[in-house]
Amino acid sequence: MGWVLFALAGAGCLLAAFWLMFRVRRQLGEMVELLEEIRAGNHNRRLLAPPGRMTAPLAYAINRLVRDYEEERLRFRQTEEADRQLMTGLSHDIRTPLTTLIGYLDAVHRRVVTGPERERYLEIARQKAHRLKGTTDELFSWFKLYAGEEPLQPVRLDLGELTRGILVDWVPLLEEGKIAYEVEIPEQPFWVKLDPEGYRRILNNLLQNLLDHSGATRVTLSLETSAEAVTVRLADNGVGIAPEDLAHIFDRLYKCDPARTSVGSGLGLAIARQLAEGMGGQITAESRPGQGTAFVLGFPRYGAETFQEKPKVAVRTV
Amino acid sequence: MLSLIWCELYKLKRTPFVVLVALAACLFPIPATLVSMRGGTDGSFLSLSFLLLTILAGPLLLPVVGGCLAVLLFHRERDWETLKNLYTVPVRWSGLVAAKLFVVYLGCVLFSMVSLLAVAATSSLTGTPATPFFSCLAAAALVGFFYASATLPMILLVLWLDRGTLLSVLLCVLYGVAQSIQVFGGLYYIAGTASAEAAPLDSPLMWSFPILVFRWYTGFAASGQMVLGPDTAPFYLDTVPLLALSLLLMLVCGGLMVLLGRRQEV
Amino acid sequence: MTTYLIETKDLTKQYGDQTSVNRLNLHLRPGRIYGLLGRNGAGKTTTMKMLLGLTRPTAGEVLLFGMPLRGNERKILPRIGSLIESPGFYPNLTGTENLRIFARLRGIPSADAIREALALVGLPYRDKKVFSQYSLGMKQRLAIALAVMHDPELLILDEPINGLDPIGIAEIRSFLRKLCDEKGKTILLSSHILSEISLLADDVGILHQGVLLEEESLAELEARNGRSIHLSVSDSAQAARLLETELHTTAFRVEDDHSLRILDLGLPIPAIARTMLAGGLDLQDLHLCEDTLEDYFKRVTGGEGIA
C-alpha cells in the first residue's frame, strides 16, 4: 500500500513539474510573439501578467522598457517637429533675401536701370549679399553650438578689461545710431573663466539686437560682483518687450515681430544663451513695454564651481 | 483555471456565511456525538462517524451547505452585474461554472471532514479511541464529494428558475429535508428486515442516493478498501460505482448549467 | 488605405420584432476619440455590447484590430478596456480587492498597475470601504480604473461621465484627452450630452433609433453647421462665380447644384439678393441660419430635445 502511495505521489510531482514547464514555455512564447508585434511598430501593446506568475517580473520589465522607449520617441518626435519648424523658418530667411538680391541683379543685367541708378542697385545687392552671408554664418554657428561641435576654451581673464575692449569697437556704431551710452565698470578686476571669443559674440549679439530692434536712445552697461558671481547688465530705454514674449525671446525662432519682416534670423539671442550656458553662466531679460529692456548676464567668479541662482543679485527694473 | 478558483475563494472574503458554516461544522457534531454515545450505538468511533455522516450531517446539512454556497456564488454575479466585466477579460461562462462548482465541492468536502474531526475529538476526549482514523477521514471526504454531486441537480434547478436568493435557499433546505426523508425511509425499511445485509434490494428505497452512500460507508470506512472482497454481501457497495455516479452527475448537470448560462443576457 | 481599429459591417441586432441596431457601419480610426452621440435608447449601449462580444449580433460582422471578433476573443479582448452601463463589482470587497481579482484574471502590465490606476482616478489605494458603501461617483471612478488598469490600446466607454461631479467630469475629460494625445490610444465613448462630445471627440457618429445617421469629424460637422447664410438658387456654379467676382468673397461652400452656404456673415443679405438676381439667377431662398451644433443634432434626430 505504501508503495502505491509513494509511486502515485512521485508521478504526481513529475506531472506537476511538466505542467509548470509547459505553462512557462507557453507564456514565454506569447511574450516573444508580442515583442515581435511591438517591433513591427505597434508600441502600445503591453505584456499582461498576473502578479503571482513566475514570468511576471520579466513581463513588467519589458513593459517598462517599451514605455520608456515610447516616451523617448515622443520626445524625439517633438524635437523633430520643432526642428522642422526651424528649417521652414530658416528657408524663408535665406530664400527671401536671396530672391530680392537676384531681383536687383537681374534688373541690372537686363539693363532696366542705367547710370547712377545701376550703381546704387549694385551697391544694394552687395550689401544684401553680405547680410545673407552673415545670416548663413550665424545659422551654421548656431547649429554647431547646438550639436556641441564648437568647443569653447575658457581662460582666466578680467571681465572688466574684456568688456571695455569690446565696447571700444561699438562706440562708433552707437554714435552713428545716435544712442547715448553709459559705461559703469569699476576699476577692480573681475576674475572669471570664459572663452573671450564667446563672450564677445554674446555682447555683440545683444548690442546688435539693441541697435536693430529696441529703438533706444540711451544704453547703460554695468558690471558688478557678488561673492560668487559677476553680473553684466545691459539696459536700454527702448520699446521694451511685451511680458508674453519675454519668456520666449531666447527660443530659437522667436521673433516679437510676427510678420518677420525685420532682418536677422531670430537666432542671435538663442546663440547668446547657448554660449552663456556653455560657459557655465546664464542670461536673463527684464523688460517693461515702453520703458526699456535689460539683459542680465551672470558668470561664476573664478574659483566658484557652479553658478547658483542668485537672489542676492539686485534686480532693478529699468 | 487555478486563477478562477482563487478568484472565487477571494470573492468569499468578508462573507458571514462562510464563518457560520465553519462554526457549524465544528460545533454541531459535538452534541450529536455525545447524545448518540449515550444510547443506540456501540460507541465505537466507526459507528459514531457512520451515524453522523450518513444519517445526520450528510443528507440534511451537506445539500444545504453546498446549495447555499452555490446560490451565493452564482447570484453574486447576477446581482452585481459583474459578468460583463468578466466576459471582457475574457473569461468564459464554462470556466466560471467549473470554478464555482469546485468551490462547492471543496466546501462540502471540508465541511464533512471538519465534522469528522469534531467527532474524533469528542470521542477521544470521552475515552473512545478514534480508529480507524485515516480511512474514516477519507470516507468523510468522499461523503462530501458524493453529496456535493447529489446537490448538483438542485443547483441546476435554482439556476434555471432564476428567482431571488430567499427562494433559492428555501429550495436548498427542502432538498436537504428530502434527502433526510429518503435516509430515514430506507432505515425504517432495513429495520423491518432481519439484518441489514439481508435486506432485499428490489425496493426503490434501497437505491436512493443517501441510501447508496449508507450502503457504501461501512464497507469503505471499516476496511479502507475501494473495492470490497468477492464474498461480501450485495448490500455493500464498492466505491467505484458511486464515483462513477458522481462523475456522471457532474458532467450532466455541469453541462446543462453551462448551456443555461449561455442564454442569459449580460 | 486607413486601417480602422473598429469596423462594423451592417451590424444588426433585433429583439423579437424590434430592431435595436440597424445595419450599422461604424469606422474608428486609430489614435482618435470617437464620440457616439444619440438619445437614450438609440442603441449606443447595444452597439458597444456587440463590439465587445457581450451580445451576439443578429446579422453583420464586427472587426477589431483588423480581425473578426468571433473566434479571436482571447487575442483581442485583453487589448481593450471597457466600461458598459453601471459599474459591476463585488460588494463585499474594497476597490483595490476588486481590481486585484481582475489583475489576477487578465494580468497587469506592471507591478504597481493597480496603485497607478487608482491614483489616476483619484481613489485611495488602502481603503477599508467596501464597494457597497461607495458613492455613485466613486463607483464610476472604479469602473474607469478597471478599464485603464491594463493599459489597453482601445477604450470603449459607455457614458463615462455618468454620475461624476463637474470637477470629476473635467478631470476625466483631460485624462482621456491626454491618453489619446500623448499615449496614442484610441477611445470610443458614447453620450447623450452633446456638449461633452463636442469638448472631447475628434470624430462624431450620430446614432438615432439604431441607425447611424452621420459619421464625420467634429471639425467638419462644426464647419458645416455653424452660423451661415443659406442660399438656394437655380444654378450653384453661377452663384459661386458671382460671389467671387461681384461680392469678392471666397468664404462659402457649395452644398449641391442648388444650394450654397455663405460663411462670410459680413455680406449684407440685400446685396447678395441683388447680385444673384442681376446675374440672371432665380432666387429661391436666402436666409441667415444660426444653427448651432445642437440645433443640427435636434434636427437630424427629429426630436424635441436631448433626452
Image (cartoon, coloured by chain):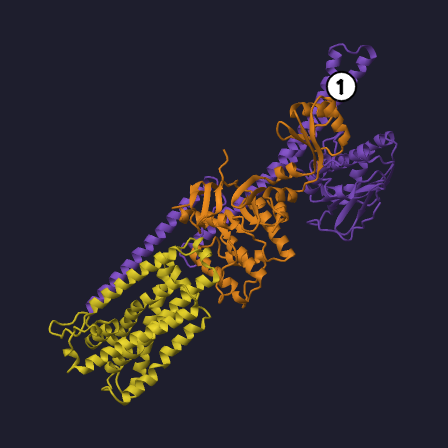
Quarter-of-image position of residue A284: top right
- Of residues C82 and A84, the one nearer the viewer is C82
Badge count: 1
Which quarter of the rendered picture does the N terminus of chain A lie within? bottom left
Residue A120 pos. (x, y %): 81, 16
- Residue type beneath disc 1: Ala
- Of residues C296 and C27, the one nearer the viewer is C296
In this image, C135 relative to B56: left or right? Answer: right
Residue C40 pos. (x, y %): 56, 51
Q: Is residue C191 above or below residue C221?
A: below
Q: Chain of mark 1?
A: A
SS at badge 1? helix
Residue matched to label 1? A125
- Residue B133 visible? The answer is no
Residue A269 pos. (x, y %): 73, 37
Mark 1: give few (<14), some (14-19) or many (20+) Cα within 10 Å: many
